Image (tube, rainbow, N blue to C red):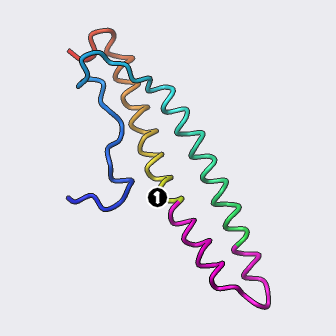
Amino acid sequence: MSIENIYQLDVLLDFRKEETPTTNYDSIADDAETKMIGILDAMNVIGTSIMNEASKKKINAEKIENLGGIISTLSDIGLLINKISCAAHYFSGIKDGSGVDANQ
């Protein structure tokens, strides 16, 4: 499978492959969730702007296309952040359940 979109990347290291695990998965998961909320809020604001623009008698097609492109980009970034959050929660659970010798 070829990688064509940012959200297809594996961006979180598996601590089991590190000699000395130093990744704080809980912190990464919390940060990713916070950023995801911000992205969804931004998409809401942009969606409202599109609805307001569409309700005008003279619709600015360029502005609608711009806002649509921004939403598309934000959704790709949101997918990536969600993937990071899920992986961080997964690795956190494995690491917490494995104890000190998690990577052996």
**Left or right: 102 as drawn, with respect to 60:** left
| Residue range of the region highlighted in magenta in the rendering | 50-73
**Left or right: 72 as drawn, with respect to 86:** right
Viewer-nearest residue: 88 or 73: 73
Image-quadrant location for residue 48: bottom right
| Total tally of numbered discs in the picture | 1
Query: Relative to residue 74, is residue 104 depicted above or below?
Result: above
The residue most toward the bottom is 57
**Left or right: 38 as drawn, with respect to 22:** right
At x 44%, y 27%, the residue is: 25
Query: From the image, which quarter does the N terminus lie in?
Result: bottom left
- Residue 76 lies, in percent from the top left, at 46, 58
At x 26%, y 22%, the residue is: 18
At x 67%, y 60%, the residue is: 44
Query: Relative to residue 51, is residue 59 depicted above or below?
Result: below
Query: From the image, which quarter does the C terminus lie in?
Result: top left
Viewer-nearest residue: 104 or 60: 60
- For disc 1, the marked residue is 76
Viewer-nearest residue: 87 or 38: 38
Main SS category, magenta section:
helix
- Residue 102 lies, in percent from the top left, at 28, 15
- Residue 29 lies, in percent from the top left, at 49, 33
Query: Relative to residue 100, is residue 51 depicted above or below?
Result: below
